[in-house]
Amino acid sequence: MTPAGSLLVAQDLHKSYGPTPALDGAGFSIHPGEVVAVMGPSGSGKSTLLHCLAGIVTPDSGTIRYDGRELSAMSDAERSALRRTEFGFVFQFGQLVPELTCVENVALPLRLTGVKRKEAERRSLEWMERLEVADLGHKRPGEVSGGQGQRVAVARSLVTQPRVVFADEPTGALDSLNGERVMQLLTEAARSTNAAVVLVTHEARVAAYSDREIVVRDGKSRDMMLEHSV
Amino acid sequence: MSIGHTLLGLLESGPRHGYDLKRAFDEKFGHDRPLHYGQVYSTMSRLLKNGLVEVDGVEAGGGPERKRYAITEAGVTDVETWIRQPEKPEPYLQSTLYTKVVLALLTGRDAGDVLDTQRAEHLRLMRVLTDRKRHGDLSDQLICDHALFHLEADLRWLELTAARLVQLASEVRT
Amino acid sequence: MKRRLHDLGLGIRFALGGGREGWARTLLTAVGVGLGVALLLGAASVPHLVDQRADRIHGRQPFSAGSEKNTGQVKASLLYASADTEYRDETIGGKLLRPADADPVLPPGLSSVPAPGTMAVSPALHELLDSPEGRLLRQRLPYDITATIGDAGLVEPSELYFYAGSPSLSPDSGASSAAGFGNIGETEPLDPMLVVFVILICVVLLMPVAIFIATAVRFGGERRDRRLAALRLVGADARSTRWTAGGEALAGAVLGLGVGTLLFLGGAELIGPVGLWSFGFFPGDLRPVPWLALLVAVTVPALAVLVTLAALRSVVIEPLGVVRGGRTRRRRLWWRLVLPALGVALLLLSQNPDASSGPLSAVSSGLGLPLYEYLSPLCIAAGATFVLAGLIALLPWLVEAVVGRLRGGSPAWQLAVRRLQLSSGPAARAVGGITVAVAGSVALQMYSVGIHDDFNKVTGADASRAQYTVQAEYPDAKLAERMIGAFRETPGVGKVIGTVASYVTLPGPVASQDVRPITELTLGDCATLRELARIDSCTDGDTFVVHPSDDHDRAAWVDRTARPGEPIDTSAGEPGVPPTLWTLPASARTVTARPDPAGAEHDGIFATPGAIDASLLGSSAHTAAMLSVDQRVPDAAEHIRNTAARVSPLLGVRTVRTLERDQQYAGIQTGLQAAGLATLGLIAAAMLVSQLEQLRERRRLLAALLAFGTRRATLAGSVLWQTAVPVVLGIGLAVAGGLALGALMLRIIGKTVTDWWLFLPLAGAGAAVILAVTLLSLPALWRLMRPDGLRTE
């Protein structure tokens, strides 16, 4: 079941919030540079799967291996460090710090890893340029549109040159044009840095930017591509 | 939509007379377009010729053609292949998909599987279109988008049907 | 108007019927307002409390048969003598009583005069005497305890007081006679400087309370704004939503009045018996002055509504959300400087209230002192109030100006600074309370210390030498001898001398504009007299004329009365008393004085007991023992007092230490600091609540930050800086303002600043506030920094 050369592999994940199981034997795998869509109806456990894969949430049982290391064996601090340096994140909304300017928001993950402010902001501006929002650098998130804000968030998720980007409904709050543009920029940027993208979405047109999809239903996952090719 | 596969599927749950087959078909799938007797008999004779069905028995006395048909091993395999095979994503295929889902439910196959397979097929095409859009000019993009939106509508329907499978199953089996 | 009332009513319904969350918010506001109201009610009770205290003190003052108070011409029926004493750091009041007839008058709190050898004690004294700490005191007060003094006879619940029955009390041995109790002495005019003090204390304590109440009614504001937006969606206009918000605040404030009243009553029961800064009271005496209580009851809800309406001015509540007025306009400085400038000007123009010159000095006020003596304190109080209020106005500008210039730094610092840059108003407002409290306390402390040090210099007393004088208010040469004997055997006592001293005058007519020559006559045995003057030979019956060691004028003054061979009036020329003549023997030699054990020189006439009968001496005569004491002996003072009590309960023991006033000033100091600290605590609570609220609003953001690997320490750091920056600025401003104010006030009374570092404890407390608010926010921060926040609501 586990394809060789996978960067991040999860098997038989179980996770419950209270009595209701959010994950019930789900699995997952992704290669470097691959974009994998996680699809499924609301409440199916998509986001929980993403949180587990990213080491934000610890599953009740099951294994998650990232780059040969078992995530559940790591301490909270180690997983935080991993998220800072190797992972990037884009969420649906509410992720930009409203007080910081856009460029400071993008620079924040770099600053958290100890990069000097000047250097961090220089690199941030490069990424903002790639995502076509360089001119927003000194505005605050409250002063830019939703699509622009989401591009800033994408720039932030990529600025540390992560090996995996986790995107949870990154276009959920955007119209189709803006959503497509964000997806286009995200996948292009990720491919150019050979970063893997875990894309949680319920929208087919967004999932169409992926190389492969995984369907989560009632806490169980199905890798359609894998079964189909067999 | 393949009437032959549909009738084969209906036979899978047990041998039936031509008349029964027409009634069952109309009841489950012929909401807007009831089947003619002629269509039933011409289809059955084609299936007989291909060895997918066999005549189970002839009732004496009754009407002109009181033959009872049963599905053969080859017929079951044919139905299986047909149901599992995702349809080529194109407009107005939901009646075929619907037929497949209902038949899967009737014959105890995994209907969710049918839908997921179809979804994967849709997405595969959507990926192709999205990729084309990415590298094409504006007119390419607009044309691809049109197709994408239709495919997305189908996919939504697939999602919705998947969410209602339990309800559908209980209705179909009555 | 009717609409507004309707909107208010809607708000009240929201506050009380808004489900669990609505209740939580209303309760939070109510508790906050309640704390403030309790303090206000406490302040409003002070006048009544002071009156009650004065009444209690006066109520047990005896008056004599001849006094004005005795209008019914009751004859004296009780003999009493004061037997006050000290025990370690406590003052113990007491009287010896002896009935003069079968139906003696009684002091309040007693049901009968204690029989000889027994005493009635206050509950606190009873407790002390029964405890191991009171062992030495028990030796001094060996009487059987047969009764307890009722509350009516005590000034405060923790007062140490006793009434002992005496078998032998007589007017000859220093007793007075009482015809009744309840001597209302003449009301002393209030010291003008004290008026300044009281006004300033009120300002310093009440301004932060007002600020705190204003902060408390804003608790839960952001959530409420969203609720109001929903109200707009169903068609309410902007104005009526503001009034609805006002109604919510009103409900919280009115509930707060209730909570405050309960806290006040509970607090009175709790604090009264224990006492606050050595000032206890009977809970029943703590009653707010009605009109002040009414003022609180009206002002607080009105303040709540007004503050809410004002706060919502900068907030636009739209049907689909809340737009906080991103203030593009910078805060202006000039009008914020008007108040402090006005205050400084008033202070510079004010004159010393104790100085009796100036243009207004002749105008009478009708209050016992000339008008200027009241006007000037008012100017000072107004000036100081303006300066303090000005500091509150200056702070938001200062915070904005400073924060706007801050750049760079670590992510934690950057997060905090950016947050403050975006909206420093709430933080600056809360810290404003700290600023007033600290600035006021610093100024008042400087002021009180300035006066206090001045007083210390005047006396020049050196407490480490700790000399004691034991004194009886009647002449008794035998007593003096007995005291010498008894004290010599008391642990810790070095030199002892015992004397009977009295004033004597030159008899005969004196020119009307001339002062009658007068000097002191000291009666003691040869050993004692040798301690006080350089005497070579001395036998009983000798007399001496004693000159001060280096003051010729004074020596000449002594010689005008002390003329060997000439008569002297030993009754000291008391009016209405015929002169008692005694001739100073011609053999009297002139000698030079030397310092007594307490360091003072005595001049005049020295006589041995054989030369004059002590009973010839007039009413100014007293018997005294002077002792030098080795302070290293533990409880030396208590042993001396015990010995004195054994010799006679009527002996008063005094030390030259300035203990009494020291304690008074120390009391003011600790009082000010405690009040400052209490205010800091209150403001810290308010800051904590807003901090927690702000954190809760940012759940999703915190979860996102956690997702991309933000260390908890980084966020904790940002919370710390976010509190620290405004508090440090506020305290800095407060210290600068307080020092300036204190220096100005000292300048007015012509004193110089003696201690520039008094603000340190309060600055330290400020640091503690920063830490406390941060630490207490952390659990909530940890709880909110969970992936749950990422899940869509």
Image (cartoon, coloured by chain):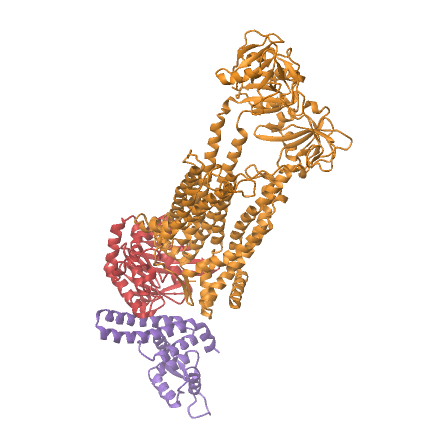
Q: Colour of chain A?
A: red
Residue C699: give x, y in percent of width and height: 41, 56
Residue A54: give x, y in percent of width and height: 35, 56
Position of C269 with respect to C465 (left or right) is right
Towards the viewer: C584 or C669: C584
Towards the viewer: C302 or C616: C616
Position of C446 with respect to B141 (left or right) is right
Please give the name of the residue rendered at 59% of the width and 31% of the height, measured from the top-left corner.
C91
Q: Colour of chain B?
A: purple
In the image, residue C760 sits, relative to residue A188, either above or below, namely above
Disc count in the image?
Answer: 0
In the image, residue C326 sits, relative to residue B165, either above or below, namely above
Q: Is residue A67 visible?
A: no
In the image, residue C689 sits, relative to residue C625, either above or below, namely below
Residue B167: give x, y in percent of width and height: 46, 74
Residue C531: give x, y in percent of width and height: 55, 13
Chain drawn orange, letter?
C
Q: Is residue A225 visible?
A: yes
Please give the name of the residue rendered at 31% of the width and 74% of the height, measured from the top-left corner.
B149
Which of the 4 quarters of the picture holds residue C546?
Answer: top right
Which of the 4 quarters of the picture holds residue B64?
Answer: bottom left
Which of the 4 quarters of the picture holds residue A8?
Answer: bottom left
